[in-house]
Amino acid sequence: MTLKATVIADADFVISKLDRRLFGTFVEHMGRCVYGGIYEPGHSTADANGFRQDVMALTRELGPTIVRYPGGNFLSGYDWEDGVGPKEDRPVKLDLAWHSTETNEFGTNEFMIWCKQTGVEPMFAVNLGTRGPDEARHFLEYCNHPGGTYYSDLRISHGFKEPHNIKFWCLGNEMDGPWQTCAKTAHEYGRIAQETAKVMKWVDPSIELTACGSSQRLMPTYGKWEYEVLDTCFDQVDYISLHHYMRNDGNDIKEFFAEIEALDYFITEVAAIADAVAASRRSTKRIMLSLDEWNVWYKAHTPDDLKKPGWPKAPPLLEEIYNFEDAMVVGGALIVMMNHADRLKAGCLAQLVNVIGPIMTETGGPAWRQTIFHPIADCTRLGHGEVLRLKVDTTTFETKSQGDIPHLLTAAVRDPQTGHVAIYALNRSTEDAMELDIDLRGMGEGLALVAATELHHADLKIVNTKDNEVIKPAPNGSATVKGSRLTAQLKPQSWNVFAIETQQ
């Protein structure tokens, strides 16, 4: 059978301006994300800084807007001073988070050079596991103060006269997790976050700060953690973080699609908790949300995937091989994220390369796009402007975990300056095609379809390899725009993107 879905998209009904930081990613000192990923001196494509240019080219194509660094669990045992200054003087240390040897050959200034060459904004994090407010303020002074003080002059002595001016900072990582080096209770973390935020903003009042939320929605302290932490540091921070990984342990595509709904509820719940803290103060301030770790991750999850014996340097860890169904779920998550643009202002897909990443490399060899690369690139390329509030009429299907959920997931982003509209549509039926009809109201005259593409394959388990990119965008030849209506046929289990512009 053929399903039918109708959508009304009106230019006057806006959820919020889309913060481009929503399309970020994550680089952690873990596995081959840094060493053998973005940084590999001696590789045939490496530049003078040791940066792999094939990875950099794919990163630019992927289009992330902000990149979180240096962790992750790695952060809670990291001394930032180890990663600056002459490389020959940097200490080699044990990394307790990933049972690896960290050479510190790559650090703060190398990452900043990479960011500038790649064209992304840095999102830095401070260690609130083994360290605290004093080290955090010194790190910020090193990075952002113009000069004339010990730490800013230290940066200058390392060859960086101009300050890095890093504006987005995370206060620790997953501090509720027992796996974290020096994990804390909500009270302990709330107090150290409050004091760290206070002194960091004394050093540079222009920065934005994110407090740690729960490591995941299933943590036993979830909800209570968010409330107590924000009740303590509400006045000092700007964001609270969310971490969410979607799984398919039961090998059930319907339940896998339902994981997207769990993310939707998660975002709604955390925003409500933050607003409850504001209400208790009669405050008009609104804490925004940063989904600074998210992805599909369930296959590379064995003890051997997490740690290798013998404290190796940059061992292969969490090298998830993504298939076609993973790409659809990533696309669905991006739709949910855009539709929460009023509160969700930043997002970081974890991670960029090799470690549960959209980009894979072979050490000494090629780099290639995993299946999940394409929905991300679709959003970074076309997602500019305002997210519209849509009226969607679609059929539903039953799931065990989330009840009845819609076959169609969709989002529309319109740039009021140019009139360009991007529409994202995921058909979650694995059996039925879908007739999609979208009424584009108030968009102006002379609408024209610029491009229509789809990701589709009959085999949910198909993967991309270094030799064969099976999953990549293909034209959707059924799509048309006539007057103010977009119509298209969506294949079963397909991710679709429509780019529309005004001709007048």
Image: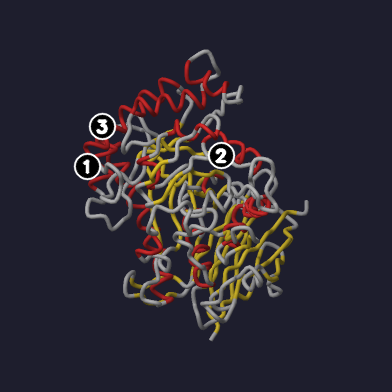
Which callout, 2 or 1, points to the residue nearer the camera? Answer: 2
Task: Return the residue at label 1.
Answer: 185
**Left or right placement of residue 393 versus residue 215 in this view:** right
Extreme residue in the bottom direction: 1
Extreme residue in the right direction: 504
Q: Secondary structure at mark 1?
A: loop
Q: Can you tell which mark lies on residue 108?
A: none
- Earlier sequence position, callout 2 versus callout 3: 2
Instruction: Mark 1: give few (<14), some (14-19) or many (20+) Cα within 10 Å.
Output: some
Color theme of the render = secondary structure
Instruction: Mark 3: give few (<14), some (14-19) or many (20+) Cα within 10 Å.
Output: some
Mark 2 and mark 3: span between their CA atoms?
A: 30 Å
**Left or right placement of residue 306 versus residue 361 in this view:** left
Report x, y in % for residue 402.
34, 69
Q: Looking at this view, is 448 or 343 the one in front?
A: 343
Residues at discs 3 and 1 in contact (Cβ within 8 Å): no
Q: Name the residue located 49 percent from the left edge and 57 percent from the top edge.
A: 355
Residues at discs 2 and 1 in contact (Cβ within 8 Å): no
- Earlier sequence position, callout 2 versus callout 1: 2
Q: Name the residue located 48 percent from the left edge and 43 percent from the top edge.
A: 103
Report x, y in % for residue 33.
52, 52
Report x, y in % for residue 161.
61, 22
Task: Return the residue at label 3.
Answer: 191
Mark 2 and mark 1: span between their CA atoms?
A: 32 Å
User: Is residue 407 in view?
Assistant: yes
- Earlier sequence position, callout 3 versus callout 1: 1
Q: Looking at this view, is 360 or 25 the one in front?
A: 360
Task: Return the residue at label 2.
Answer: 111
